[in-house]
Every structure is written in structure tokens, then in C-alpha cells.
Amino acid sequence: MERPNNQFCADAGGKYCPCHLAYSGDCIKCSLIRGEKICECKWQGVCIYNELQHNKIVPVEERKELLCKVVESKEIEDKIYHLKIQIPNYLIKNLCEPGSYVFLKDKNRDSVYFNAPISVMDVDEENNILEVVVVPRGIKTKPLVNCEYVTLKAPYFNGIFGLKEIKSNQNDRCVVILDGLSQVNAINVIRRLLRNNNQVEVFINEEGKRLEMVEQKIKDMAVNINLFNLNDKKEILENYIRNEKVSFVYSCGLIYFNKDILKLVDSIDKNIKFAIPNNNLICCGEGICGACTVRLNNCRIKTCKAQMNGREFLSNLK
């Protein structure tokens, strides 16, 4: 099966690159490592192929499991818990990035089978506190809300499709649309957009699950919140995007909601940049197990590591 040559790996050029996929000849980004004759990576950072050749005798840099104290575990909605976890200072910077996520498991479980991928909601940089929202539904997540300590593995970066658009957008008008529990990863997105001197307006689907804690954090950033729905109040969102000449939209919901939002956005202007949360099944986070793999444009994509354009992902996903 043909492999696309335009994939970008969320780990490329960072501390955890080259990874196990590079050592096995399956690098997401580098065509030379995959055994092809022509370099097609279009990568402007440190050459991954060169790094691999010089580091073949060096063990792969892996994320470490850390025992971390749960400072607070509070039920904020029915069967929805807000956890505050004390983490090492060196993780803070990475976990403040849009799309960052962690793996958590019960401290009494040794096997990686019990790792649960959890989006970062917020980070208290002064006190080294990670904030996450956990819904205890199965054997992985039920123990997390009653633990004094959890095992944490981090950082991971590919929790959003469209990171390039989020990080590069500057001095413009942006819209963030929230629906359901996907909204928890919007805080870091909004902060980055504001840091880049963008004007941000938030729209919340009033028919979906709303978290007062998330809304308060948004208000604390002096960002305006609007309520809408796609049945009889979509004109509120549609008119704002059109009249304010919005350049970027982050649709933070499940896939079918995001598809409806994309359809609305494209009816206004197909040049508007578009990003979405990565809601695919994630198991190992390293591109090894294949649980997150989807077929896109007749190619297999490891969505735990491969960074995609949000519009392209939704338009071509079958």
C-alpha cells in the first residue's frame, strides 16, 4: 500500500526522535529511513536520517513512567472527575502545548496495557500541577479517580490535527467551537492563539455536555463565550465567521459534530484554516501497536504520531 510522503510526525526533531519506528525502518517522516531512494521529507529541522546514522549504538530515548501524587480528585459532574496531579517541573513546558496528552494508570498496575490516554486540560505552572478530566468507564479509568498516586507517562503531542495552523496563526480573528467532553483540550489552544495576538471568540454547543470549570477558565482569559446549536441557532456562528472574516476555526467535538462544522465553514470560505481534536483510539502513543491506524487517501496513517490537516482528515476519512 502506498505511503503518503507529506506526513509530519509530532515527535520529529524533538527529544524522542529518532524513535523505535526509525530504528525499524518505518519512520513516519523520513523516506530515506524507509528505504526509498529520494528524500521527500521537506523537513527543515535536524536531519532525522543523519541523526539515526550517528545514534545507532545509542538506546532509543523513551518517555519514562513516573509515580505522581494526586493532589485532588473531585466529581464535577455526574461520573466526571477533575484531577490535579503533582508533576515534575521539566514536564511543564511540554504539557502547556496545544494537543498535549498523557498516559495515566493505577499505580498498582505494572503492565502498559492499563495505560489510559488523557488530554491535558490545564497546567498550573507555578505549582507544577497538571489538571485533567477523567470519566471512569472501564478497567483503565475507574481506579484513577480514587488513587492517592498514579503512574504518569508523558509528554505526548498529537492530540490535535492542525497544530501547524494553531501555532502559526497570528494577529487575526479565530473561532473556537466546543461540544461535549472534547472541550477539555481547548484551554491550551486558546492560550496559544491569544499569545500569538489573535482575537478569539468561543462558541459552545448548548445541546451538548457543558463543563462549568472549562467555561470559567475561558472567561478568566477574558474571552467571550456564545451559545449556539446546529439545529436552530447555527446562524449565530455562521454570521460571526462571515462578518468578522475569521481566518481560523478550531472545532472541538466528536467526529460527526466536526464534520457538520466543517461543512458550515466551507460554505462560507474553504480557505479558512481548520483544526480538530484527535479523537482516534490511542493505545501505545508510539506508533507501534497499530490500534490508532486509519485509512486515509488509500494509505495507512498512525494517528497517535502522524500530524494531519484537520480539513483533509475529515474530508477523506471513510
Image (cartoon, rainbow, N blue to C red):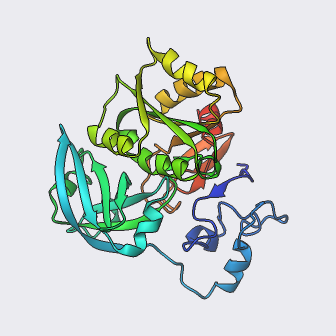
Is 157 situated above or below 217? below
Is 26 situated above or below 187? below
Residue positioned most to the top: 232
User: What residue appears at the point 29 percent right and 68 percent down from the top-left corner?
Assistant: 127
| Residue 212 relative to residue 59: left or right | left
| Location of residue 285 in the rendering, given as x and y in whole percent from the top left corner | 47, 59
For the question of whether residue 249 can be seen, the reply is no
Is 173 situated above or below 195? above
Is 151 situated above or below 249? below
| Location of residue 150 in the rendering, given as x and y in whole percent from the top left corner | 24, 65
For the C terminus, the image quarter is top right
Residue positioned most to the bottom: 57
User: What residue appears at the point 47 percent right and 65 percent down from the top-left corner?
Assistant: 94
Residue positioned most to the right: 38
Residue positioned most to the front: 222
For the question of whether residue 103 can be seen, the reply is yes
| Location of residue 100 in the rendering, given as x and y in whole percent from the top left corner | 46, 57
| Location of residue 146 in the rendering, given as x and y in whole percent from the top left corner | 14, 57
| Residue 71 relative to residue 283: left or right | left
Between 21 and 206, the one nearer to me in the picture = 206
| Residue 274 relative to residue 254: left or right | right
User: What residue appears at the point 69 percent right and 72 percent down from the top-left corner?
Assistant: 48
Total residue callouts: 0
User: What residue appears at the point 44 percent right and 35 percent down from the top-left corner?
Assistant: 253
Between 3 and 231, the one nearer to me in the picture = 231
Between 209 and 114, the one nearer to me in the picture = 209
Residue 223: image quadrant is: top left
